[in-house]
Image: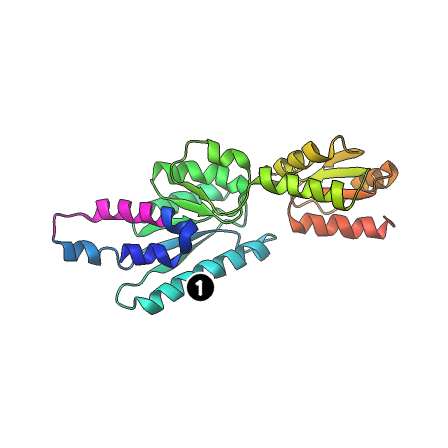
C-alpha cells in the first residue's frame, strides 16, 4: 500500500513519500506479522504547508488543491487503505513556520510534507523537518541555498533561482532588448535571490532599489524609476507588491 501511495503523487514526489513510508514502517513495527505492518500504512496523512490565507493565498490555495486532488484520486482507487490531507496555513510568513513545522513533526501519522511553499519559511521550517526525519517536497521554493544545507529530507519540484533568474534575464536582454533596466526586489529570500541572478545576465542595471513585503506606498521608488530613464523593470518578489508597484508606475505615466 505504501508503494501505491507513493505512485499516486507522481515521479517527483516518490522519494519523499518512500522515505516517509520507511520512517512510518520503522515506527509502527511492533513485532507483529506482515498483515499488521500493511494495515499500519493506512490512515496516514500528507501535509500541505503554505499560504492558505493572507496576501499570498492565491499561490498556496492552488498548490493545496493539487495535493488534495492527488490524494482524492488515490483514495478512490484504494478505498480499503486511504490517506488524508492535513493543512498547515503558514500565510507565507517565516515567523509562523517553526510552530507549524513542530506541529507536523509531532503528528506521527504525517508521513510527508508538500511544501513549504516559499523560500523564507523553508529556511526556518526545514531544519525542524530534518530533525524529525519528515520528508518534504516544495513545489515553489526556489532559493538555491536550500539544497546546500545537508537536509536529507529536502526535495524540490521546480527550477531554482539559478535557472529561473537567467531565463528572465535573457528575456529582458535578448527579446525585449532593453538597454536600461531598473531592478527592484522585496528583500525576501525569494525576491532578492531572483534579482541577483537576473543582474548576472543583464549586467549593471541603470538603477536598483529595495522595498518591503507588505509595503503599499511606492512613490519614492516610482520617482527613481522614472528619473532613471529605464525602459524595463525587473521586480523580484511576490505579486501583491508587484501589482501595487505597477499600478503606481502606470499612474505616474511610466
Tell me which segment is drawn in magenta: 17-32
Instruction: Find out whether residue 20 is within the magenta segment.
Output: yes
Badge 1 density bin: few <14, some 14–19, many ≥20, Cα 10 Å: some
- State the residue lying farthest toward the front: 174
Q: Position of residue 73 (x, y in %)?
A: 39, 66
**Left or right: where does residue 31 sit relative to residue 160?**
left
Residue 68, quarter of the rendered image:
bottom left
Which residue is at a point 34% across and 40% down the rendered structure image?
A: 132
- Identify whether 24 is placed above or below 67: above
Task: Tell me if 150 is positioned left or right of 133 in this view.
Answer: right
Residue 236 visible: no
At x 72%, y 52%, the residue is 243
Q: Tell whether position 170 is magenta.
A: no
Could you tell me which quadrant the N terminus lies in?
Answer: bottom left
**Residue 170, above or below 1:** above
Q: How many marks?
A: 1
Residue assigned mark 1: 69
* Colour scheme in use: rainbow
Q: Is residue 182 above or below residue 140?
A: above
Q: Nearer the viewer, residue 187 or 230?
A: 230
**Is residue 52 shown above or below 214?**
below
x then y, percent, for residue 96: 49, 44
**Is 196 on the left or on the right of 111, as rendered?**
right
Q: Nearer the viewer, residue 79 or 55?
A: 79
Helix, strand or loop at disc 1? Answer: helix
Residue visible at 38% across and 54% down?
Answer: 46
Residue 209 rendering spot, x and y as whole percentages: 74, 35
| Nearer to me, 38 or 56 | 38
Q: Quadrant of residue 220?
A: top right
Where does the image place residue 122, in percent across and percent down from the top left?
Answer: 49, 41
Instruction: Evaluate whether residue 38 shows in this view.
Output: yes
> What secondary structure do most residues of the magenta stretch adopt?
helix
Amino acid at each position: 500500500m505504501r508503494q501505491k501511495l507513493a505512485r499516486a503523487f507522481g515521479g517527483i514526489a516518490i522519494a519523499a513519500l518512500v522515505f516517509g513510508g520507511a520512517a512510518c514502517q520503522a515506527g509502527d513495527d511492533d513485532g507483529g506479522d506482515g498483515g499488521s505492518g500493511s494495515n499500519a500504512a493506512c490512515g496516514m496523512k500528507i501535509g500541505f504547508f503554505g499560504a492558505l490565507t493572507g496576501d499570498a493565498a492565491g499561490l498556496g490555495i492552488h498548490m493545496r488543491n493539487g495535493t488534495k486532488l492527488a490524494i482524492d484520486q488515490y483514495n478512490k482507487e484504494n478505498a480499503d487503505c486511504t490517506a488524508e490531507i492535513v493543512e498547515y496555513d503558514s500565510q507565507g510568513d517565516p515567523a509562523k513556520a517553526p510552530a507549524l513545522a513542530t506541529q507536523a513533526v509531532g503528528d506521527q501519522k504525517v508521513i510527508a510534507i508538500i511544501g513549504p511553499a516559499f523560500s523564507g519559511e523553508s529556511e526556518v521550517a526545514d531544519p525542524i523537518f530534518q530533525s524529525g526525519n519528515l520528508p518534504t517536497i516544495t513545489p515553489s521554493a526556489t532559493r538555491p541555498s536550500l539544497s546546500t544545507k545537508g537536509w536529507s529530507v529536502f526535495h524540490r519540484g521546480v527550477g531554482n533561482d539559478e535557472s529561473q533568474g537567467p531565463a528572465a534575464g535573457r528575456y529582458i536582454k535578448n527579446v525585449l532588448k532593453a538597454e536600461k533596466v531598473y531592478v527592484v526586489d522585496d528583500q525576501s529570500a525569494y525576491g532578492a535571490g531572483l534579482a541577483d541572478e537576473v543582474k548576472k545576465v543583464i549586467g549593471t542595471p541603470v538603477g536598483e532599489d529595495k522595498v518591503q513585503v507588505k509595503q503599499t506606498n511606492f512613490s519614492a521608488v516610482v520617482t527613481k524609476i522614472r528619473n532613471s530613464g529605464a525602459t524595463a523593470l525587473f521586480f523580484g518578489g511576490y505579486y501583491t507588491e508587484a501589482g501595487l508597484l505597477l499600478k503606481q508606475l502606470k499612474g505616474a505615466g511610466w
